[in-house]
Amino acid sequence: GPSLPPGGSFLPPGGSLNDPSLQTDGQLNDSSSSSVQVLDPPSVKPCKQIVVIRENPTNVPEHIDPLLVLSRVVGCEQVDQLFVTSKQSEIVYSSQGVVVAMETVSRQQRLFLGHTDRISALSLGCEEKVLVSGQMGSQAVIRIWDFLSGECLAVLKVHHSGLHCLSLSKCGTVLCGVGLSKHNRNMIVLWNTSQVLVNGAATVIAKCHVDVDVEKMKMADFDPSRLASCGSKNIRIWRVKGGNLRSSPVDLKSHHNLHFSDVTFQYSYYGDLENRFIFACSRSGCVIEVHYQTMAMRRVWQVVPSDVPLQCLRVHEDFAVTGSGDGILRIWTLDFSKLVLEVQFSSSVTATDITQDGLAILAGTDKGSIGLLNAVSKEYSSLVNAIGSVKIIRFGTSAKVLYVGCQHSVSIWSTTSGELIQEVLIQQGLLAFSSHPRLPLIACGLESGEVWVFNTENTADTIKYRALMEGKPVQLEYSLAEEPHLYVALSDGAVALYDAHHSLIKVVKGVTAARHSRDELLVLSQEGHRMAVIGPQVTNVSIFELLRGDIQKVVCFDVSEFTNSKVLFTVKQVLFAPNGHLMVLTNKGVLLLFHPLSGEFLSKVL
């Protein structure tokens, strides 16, 4: 088989957690000094050897004017893998099918686009020059990127599905991927990627099918031909030789029934194998140390209670970091005899990384929070905040502010920095909300049938009232008039009108389609003088004139009259265009344009 390039060596670390200034006087849970509270491709046919697809095929125009350009990703989902660059300047993580590289100071993002499914594996190597990402699903595509320029160098497709682990050597010459074959067996593939920055070439070095569980697999920093893996009831050491990938199991003795969740080589700049160790953590709270050369299990530590699963593990020159299901990131001395520092998160810690100098530690949770901990000053910086399960998302009057509604909260985000500005917690289930165009107010419709109006500058200053006893508030809209009124669409088809002081003016019944599947039943014109609603039936659109303290119907029409079809058309959405025209979208994908005052039919777009 092809020969493997040398693995390179580390520089000595610039800091040590054994420094007396970082100790906590022997106390394992000193909340005053050591605990930080954190709120929280196209389808590619596999080739036997060279698997390279260059970007920009000849039949695709080089310059395409896109309708939309993704500029920023706000928040993320569960963090499975992340990386921090050596100078702490950038962090790398994924959100759905996008790889995000974000500067830690300015919060500016570089986005790596091209995946067609959720990203399930990441790896950064070649002195941070090469980034590798892989996606889940039946199209288990691996993309190799030039990390500095963001260019996609190659696309690999060997695994049939289930790609869940990637490991790129420190020097960037060898890539390892773990996934499933078409027969649903674990398949490990190694590529020679030494020329990928030159011409995008990636040559398969070795491929093997295994029946043992491989949950995580890491390549040794000191030699890209050596690897370690872990999974249910096994820790194995691998080596590539003569084009073959072979492994040997570690004798786990009485610990052979443990489920191991992560494995890592200890970071070290010593070159001899006598000082090389492998560490693995388990879902039952213990850490096992294995001597690499002899493959002998040396020590076992029960670092957390057996009912607390350890999710991730990293080991530096003289300290170790664990993340666990109880939401705590723990920093230990290398022999796990002393807990140096704890960081409490609001959910399970699922990923962590350490800078090469050991001075900064990155952590991510299963809810999507990411933060950076300075190991010297013990200062924690929240870089990505968890959003939760999103129900409603709306821009404020300024495109720089984004409002996100979840089951029990409304959060306000900056679209320029991606930072969480404020969060309003709601005890009851949220159905709808609207932000005031001029004042720091948020009106929320709740499952109890009430409408609460929050002052975001003082959340204790809250107005609570019932919208209407017979219905629940399913949509709220503030007008953009000089004195903004609040219009509340109710689940029984009525619309309630409140003045600028949130006093009820009147309730008009039978306005909207009460059983319509969409929550967006009404829309207001930009100047605030007209209102269009879906109703009173699902095939109808009604236009109202908004008077001071009153609403008056101007016209009501049935969209089926303008479709020239015997098929029943229902209204899916209504919207006032920037030029003032009323746009009506039907369930069949037909777009109809109407005059905003008279309701006169103007045109149809198929």
Image (tube, rainbow, N blue to C red):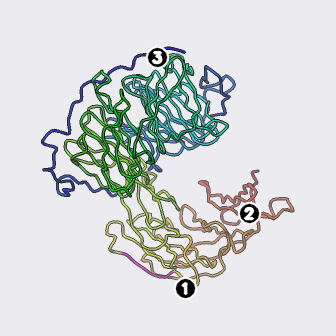
Q: Is residue 60 in view?
A: yes
Query: Which secondary structure type mostly characterizes the magenta part of the structure?
Result: strand
Residue 559, position as x, y percentages in the image: 76, 64
Residue 583, position as x, y percentages in the image: 67, 58
> Which residue is at the front of the view, 78 or 511?
78
Mark 2 vs 3: CB contact within 8 A: no
Q: CA distance from mark 2 to mark 3?
A: 74 Å
- In the image, what residue occupies the spot 52% across and 75% down? 447
Q: Which residue is mark 2?
A: 600
Mark 1 vs 2: CB contact within 8 A: no
On residue 469, the disc is 1
- Amino acid identity at mark 3: Leu
Q: Which residue is mark 3?
A: 4
Q: Is residue 40 in view?
A: no
Q: Earlier in the sequence, mark 1 or mark 2?
A: 1
Residue 162, position as x, y percentages in the image: 58, 41
